[in-house]
């Protein structure tokens, strides 16, 4: 039985090692991530006093009821619509691009993928700002369209500008997972499909699309979720007029000082994210 | 292959789409760089070549202060997040311990959580905890450098650990056993075998953390104090007041900084990929 | 007599396992194994995958701690020591060479960890490298080496530490057939040269037969039989052993006395003396196909065991022909030489079969 004890001891030591290795980051995450999350949850049930401070008593669901009010409802609807439009545009543009990438020689493919990655790594604010310049009155795009006789383009501070900015910001998030799932496609299945169904569109609908569905879903979530919560893009390109959920939450904290409403909306946003993630894992995806 | 393309979607359409995507991705960045040298006072209009907007940057002490805050925040938070994230990655990939599954799931949250939510969380946490600290210890803490670093570390640990975990998962655990069979202690096995092999992953994670820290506007805006604004937050507030040619040149500088980081990460990925290939070959022909 | 054997055992036992068991959660991977491996012996642990042979090896290496039992190396209890405190070294299945180190650094690793003086390290490393005939490759990285060369480096990396016992986990499994045969020979040569105990794990019976002084066959966590390759082939005591090493027919029988069994058809045959089972037990008679003679009863010894049946199928293998012969109570496989002077039979032929009394082994069912 002496050895049995040694076995147990080594097992316990291993567990302890693992625990102490994880402890600093685990503790950090509990203190600076989980606790803040809990505080937000608590605040979402609190009441805003007339002075703008928050009373941590008198718990109620008022902040969530606010979701039904026209102002908030408009913001939510607009966010969902803009995020959906963004997602669909990204999908339509990215699918053929990812397909194109996957069918190139390895060197060309790598160059294309890196070309997609580079904007994703460059500063987010700068990328949005660039569009502000491009779309500005008398800016490059306007000058160009006037020169070819299409007249002035004045879309800065409109929904269109916001969607352009969002597509620009999150297009790589759509391309990369799509590429990954198209690249995994077994060419023989497509050939078999063409053999059985004959027409290209049918092969696409019945074979290629179902098989690349995990990539489609992953990409859509990766675009839809951050678009819903976008703050910088609607501020810069929507000029504060086209408020989306993200910017509305920021306003609740930094201007309106209505913390309970801001907290409850943050939770709604997170719920969207969690539900999307569950959908993704249900659909057979493995990691984000 | 090309035959089936012709019957479904012509190759030229795919090529054209590819060209449009690349143009869409790069034209704004290139135009921004060009217009930063425009002498016109209205950004986005060409008024002849000048480097004036770059030279004025050197006189702007406010700007220099925010750059210095940004760099210090990025370096400190990256260092902390890299150490903590690597430890977390090792613990999760190589050990079992109580709470492992919870920790595993917890580490995915900061990656998928919208940054506005993260910002709200940190703001409320600091205002609450400062109240408590003030009441209990009589210490009047305020938002500033420290709160920015703490917040950046809070989201960066997760990103670092994901990158490092991928690297550890690709490393054969037998190598560590071989080291201990060859008389290495646990520490020596880590120091001489594990660490050199996961180093590219650790650097990759650190670069990602650095980029994210330098990139962040929303979270920082919520937790920054009056005297400790970072560059992106400062530039963001400037843009909202109205665009000026100086913002063009600052943006280009931020662009160049991030491009340097990209170049670093691409180089690392290449090194990683060839290393990975080597390792595959090393264990090649396995049963 | 007994005392002498015992003291000899004690002097020569390089590795000694007593009642060694290993449980993973509730699954018993190794079940109460008793085993003595002699000094300078080339010992093979043979068995199918999942039989517990690798776990046993890992327990000797210290990579697993036994759940129960006693594990000694040259008389010293080491069961609870970590791998870096044991006088053994391992050649891992896929060699586990450190990919970021050159050949020299790989080989020197163990010595550096033990803080051996630099000058001595250099001499010993070069000795080890030349022992495995890798001189000139010192600065290469593992990925620049072929499978066979990687194997040599793994051997040098282990042997340079002058272990008392060398453990090898499926050392040849990753190599292709031709290289495997070459390395078998070299491994044997190397073991004679360095003169230490080699314990290796394999699922390949031919490899075990060709290389080892003794073989231990494992199945389901139990050590079934230990013996020289000849003993294992000629006198298996367990049906699994007889089946795993070579091919065999198994005839149901009952042991009537130490040297006589009654086959299922009622026929009594003489068998070599049996110790492993007791009289009255259900047993099986293991009969190797190539030891059954076909036809020509004239040359059969007077009272040899005889059966007759009909050829069902014949399979031509080049140097031999395998017949499946249907008896009225079972089918037997017979392998006959393919030579001009041996008669050839065809499907449907009536044939007589016979074998010498010592051609069979009685095994546990």
Image (cartoon, rainbow, N blue to C red):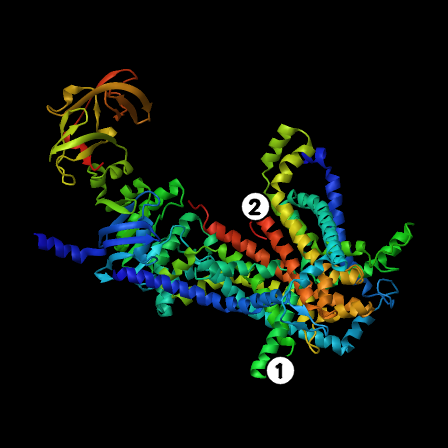
Q: CA distance from mark 2 to mark 1?
A: 50 Å
| Residue that appears at 68% across and 43% down | A100
- Can residue A231 be seen in this snapshot? no
- Quarter holding the C terminus of chain C is top left
Foreground of the two, B34 or C250:
C250
For label 2, count other residues whose C-alpha is less than 10 Å away and answer few (under 14), some (14-19) or many (20+).
Answer: few
Mark 1 chain: B
Disc ID at residue B24: none
Q: Secondary structure at mark 1?
A: loop
How far across and down, in percent of the image, does residue B92 sit? 48, 60
Where on the picture, by quarter, is residue B182? bottom left
Residue under pointer 1: B140
Asked whether residue A109 is in view, the answer is: yes
Nearer to the camera, A243 or B70: A243
Please tell me whether mark 2 or mark 1 is closer to you in this view.
1
Instruction: Identify the residue at horizontal 25%, vertical 51% (top origin).
Output: C32
Whole-percent x and y of residue C345?
27, 18
Residue at the farthest left position: C1
- Name the mark on residue A284: 2
Instruction: Tell me where residue B2 appears, x and y as whole percent.
Output: 68, 36
Q: Is residue C163 above or below residue C209?
A: below
């Amino acid at each position: 039985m002496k050895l049995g004890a040694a076995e147990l001891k080594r097992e316990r030591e291993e567990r302890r090692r693992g625990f102490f290795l994880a402890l600093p980051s685990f503790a950090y995450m509990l203190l600076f991530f989980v606790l803040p999350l809990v505080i937000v949850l608590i605040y979402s049930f609190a009441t805003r006093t007339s002075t703008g401070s928050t009373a941590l008593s008198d718990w109620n669901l008022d902040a969530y009821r606010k979701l039904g009010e026209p102002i908030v409802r408009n913001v939510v609807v607009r966010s969902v619509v803009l995020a959906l439009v963004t997602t669909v545009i990204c999908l339509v543009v990215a699918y053929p691009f990812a397909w194109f990438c996957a069918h190139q020689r390895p060197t060309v493919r790598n160059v294309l993928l890196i070309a997609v990655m580079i904007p994703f790594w460059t500063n987010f604010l700068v990328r949005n700002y660039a569009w502000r310049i491009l779309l500005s009155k008398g800016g490059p795009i306007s000058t160009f369209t006037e020169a070819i006789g299409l007249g002035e383009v004045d879309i800065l501070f409109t929904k269109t500008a916001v969607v352009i900015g969002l597509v620009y910001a999150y297009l790589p998030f759509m391309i990369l997972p799509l590429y990954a799932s198209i690249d995994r496609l077994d060419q023989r299945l497509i050939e078999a499909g063409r053999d059985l169904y004959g027409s290209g569109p049918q092969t696409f609908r019945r074979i290629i699309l179902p098989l690349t569905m995990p990539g489609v879903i992953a990409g859509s979530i990766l675009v839809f979720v951050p678009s819903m919560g976008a703050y910088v893009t609607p501020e810069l390109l929507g000029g504060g007029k086209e408020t989306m959920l993200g910017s509305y939450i920021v306003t609740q904290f930094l201007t309106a000082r209505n913390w309970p409403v801001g907290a409850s909306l943050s939770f709604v946003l997170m719920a969207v994210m969690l539900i999307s993630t569950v959908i993704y894992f249900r659909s057979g995806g493995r990691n984000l | 292959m090309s035959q089936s393309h012709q019957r479904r979607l012509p190759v030229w359409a795919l090529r054209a789409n590819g060209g449009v995507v690349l143009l869409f991705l790069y034209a704004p960045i290139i135009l921004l760089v060009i217009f930063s040298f425009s002498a016109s006072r209205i950004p986005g209009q060409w008024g002849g070549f000048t480097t004036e907007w770059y030279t004025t940057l050197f006189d702007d002490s406010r700007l220099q202060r925010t750059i210095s805050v940004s760099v210090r925040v990025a370096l400190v938070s990256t260092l902390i997040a890299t150490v903590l994230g690597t430890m977390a990655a090792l613990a999760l990939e190589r050990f079992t311990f109580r709470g492992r599954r919870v920790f595993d799931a917890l580490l995915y949250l900061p990656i998928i959580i919208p940054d506005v939510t993260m910002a709200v969380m940190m703001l409320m946490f600091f205002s609450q905890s400062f109240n408590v600290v003030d009441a209990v210890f009589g210490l009047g803490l305020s938002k500033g450098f420290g709160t920015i670093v703490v917040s950046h570390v809070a989201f960066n640990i997760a990103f670092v650990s994901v990158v490092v975990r991928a690297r550890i998962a690709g490393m054969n655990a037998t190598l560590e056993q071989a080291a201990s069979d060859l008389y290495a202690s646990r520490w020596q096995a880590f120091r001489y075998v594990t660490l050199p092999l996961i180093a590219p992953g650790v650097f990759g994670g650190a670069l990602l953390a650095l980029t994210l820290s330098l990139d962040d506007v929303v979270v920082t805006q919520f937790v920054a104090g009056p005297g400790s604004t970072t560059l992106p937050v400062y530039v963001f507030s400037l843009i909202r007041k109205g665009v000026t040619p100086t913002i063009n040149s600052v943006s280009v500088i931020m662009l160049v900084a991030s491009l340097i980081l990209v170049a670093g990460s691409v180089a690392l990925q290449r090194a990683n990929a060839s290393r990975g290939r080597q390792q595959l070959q090393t264990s090649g022909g396995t049963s | 007599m007994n005392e002498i054997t015992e003291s000899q055992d004690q002097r020569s036992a390089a590795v000694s396992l007593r009642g060694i068991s290993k449980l993973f959660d509730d699954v018993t991977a190794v079940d109460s194994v008793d085993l003595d491996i002699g000094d300078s012996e080339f010992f093979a642990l043979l068995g199918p995958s999942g039989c517990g042979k690798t776990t046993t090896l890992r327990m000797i290496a210290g990579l697993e701690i036994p759940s129960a039992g006693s594990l000694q190396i040259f008389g010293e209890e080491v069961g609870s020591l970590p791998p870096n405190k044991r006088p053994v070294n391992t050649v891992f299945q896929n060699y586990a060479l450190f990919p970021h180190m050159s050949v020299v650094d790989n080989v020197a690793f163990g010595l550096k960890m033990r803080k051996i003086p630099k000058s001595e390290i250099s001499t010993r490393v070069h000795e080890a490298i030349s022992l495995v005939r890798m001189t000139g490759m010192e600065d290469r990285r593992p990925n620049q080496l072929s499978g066979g060369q990687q194997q040599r480096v793994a051997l040098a990396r282990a042997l340079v530490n002058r272990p008392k016992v060398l453990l090898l986990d499926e050392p040849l499994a990753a190599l292709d057939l031709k290289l495997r045969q070459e390395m078998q020979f070299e491994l044997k040569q190397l073991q004679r040269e360095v003169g230490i105990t080699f314990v290796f794990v394999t699922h390949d019976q031919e490899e075990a037969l060709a290389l080892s002084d003794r073989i231990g066959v494992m199945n389901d966590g139990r050590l079934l039989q230990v013996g020289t390759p000849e003993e294992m082939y000629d006198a298996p005591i367990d049906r699994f052993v007889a089946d795993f090493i070579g091919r065999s027919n198994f005839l149901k029988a009952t042991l009537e006395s130490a040297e006589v069994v009654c086959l299922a058809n009622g026929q009594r045959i003489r068998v070599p003396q049996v110790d492993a089972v007791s009289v009255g037990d259900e047993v099986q008679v293991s009969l190797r196909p190539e030891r059954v003679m076909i036809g020509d009863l004239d040359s059969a010894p007077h009272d040899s065991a005889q059966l007759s049946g009909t050829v069902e199928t014949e399979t031509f293998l080049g140097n031999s022909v395998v017949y499946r012969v249907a008896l009225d109570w079972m089918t037997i496989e017979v392998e006959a030489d393919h030579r001009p002077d041996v008669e050839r039979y065809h499907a449907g032929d009536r044939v007589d079969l016979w074998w010498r009394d010592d051609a069979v082994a009685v095994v546990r069912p």
